[in-house]
Amino acid sequence: MIGSIKNFLHRVRQSRQPLFFLIERDFRARYTGSAAGVIWSLILPLMMVGVYSLIFSLVFGRRIGNTPFALWLFCGLLPWMTFSEIVKASAGIIEKYRSLVTKTSFQPEILVLVVIGAAVTSHVMGFAVLLALLLLVKQTMGLLILTIPLYLACLVFFSLGLGWLVSSLNVFLKDVGQAIGVVLQLWFYLTPILYPSSVIPEKFRPLLSLNPLYFITEGYRRGLLANEGVVVHDLVVFSCLTIGALMMGGYVFRRLKGQFTEVL
């Protein structure tokens, strides 16, 4: 395990220049030819927050605690959208850069990092808007907002493991790309993003710790809105799930990458 991590970090260090170039190109390519440019990366989450708020605020009220429902929703929706974007884009990343993958000197493992880098760039922009809105409504925030980078790092590592898995499998099984949309849709509604976790029956709440996205989305709300720290038990469970995802994704990717050239 430690040896694999060292090898991967060594490959990332060797490929850091093309990696940064690919991240920049991937991010710019999303908005090439559009008049609004990168503003679209802010318009989409704001539109989703507006639509969901209009519907679900009628059920749960206009405020959750002392926070307007729309901003409470934004805090959970922002990390989810980043995760969803990474997993969906990872599915086709090998084929997208097939010209690079077929080169013997290129390390295909870093391609998922290209997706993550572009998604995190959009995430940071969205987070800046969220922070500005929270300040605008005079939301009380404390020092525990500093836990947000931890949750973002957790999101990146978990997404990396799943990204390796779906990107390698999709080269051989095209149904993977189609199935991802269905799985993510179900996962979204099973995660307390549109609704507070308090509506879940008490006997089922312990199961929430088994949902990695609950740890992250709830963590954003704890750090930004409630000024509460990290729940150690949930962090331990999340870490175990993330290590499992990284090991499984890394193993499958290593086993299959030697055959990429033949299929592509």
Image (cartoon, grey):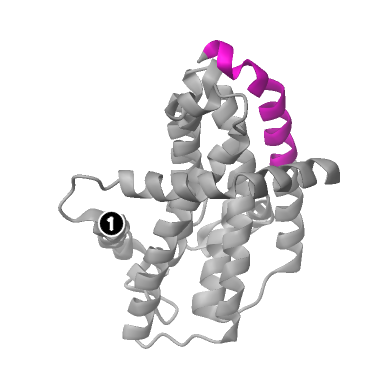
Give yes or no for residue 230 being in the magenta stretch.
no
* Side of 59 where 207 appears, left or right: right
* Residue at x 48%, y 44% (from the top left corner): 115
Residue tagged 1: 38
Q: Nearer the viewer, residue 40 or 147?
A: 40
Q: Nearer the viewer, residue 3 or 236?
A: 3
Q: Nearer the viewer, residue 99 or 63?
A: 99
* Side of 18 where 7 appears, left or right: right
Give yes or no for residue 257 being in the magenta stretch.
yes
> Where residue 230 sits in the image (x, y, percent)?
67, 71
* Amino acid type of the residue that numbered disc 1 sits on in the rendered structure: Val
Q: Quadrant of residue 209?
A: bottom right
Res 211 seen here = no
Instruction: Examine the rendered structure and indicate whether residue 222 appears above or below residue 170.
Output: below
Instruction: Examine the rendered structure and indicate whether residue 251 appears above or below residue 192.
Output: above
Q: Nearer the viewer, residue 140 or 2?
A: 2
Instruction: Examine the rendered structure and indicate whether residue 92 appears above or below residue 212.
Output: above
* Residue at x 38%, y 65% (from the top left corner): 125
> Where residue 224 sits in the image (x, y, percent)?
50, 76
* Side of 68 where 97 appears, left or right: right
Q: Quadrant of residue 89?
A: top left
Q: Quadrant of residue 45?
A: bottom left
* Residue at x 46%, y 48% (from the top left corner): 21
> Where residue 176 sits in the image (x, y, percent)?
51, 24
Res 5 seen here = yes
* Residue at x 54%, y 79% (from the top left corner): 226
Name of the residue lying farthest toward the right: 2
Q: Residues within 10 Å of mark 1 (few under 14, many from 20)?
A: some
Name of the residue lying farthest toward the top: 262
Q: Secondary structure at mark 1?
A: helix
The residue range painted magenta reads 245-263
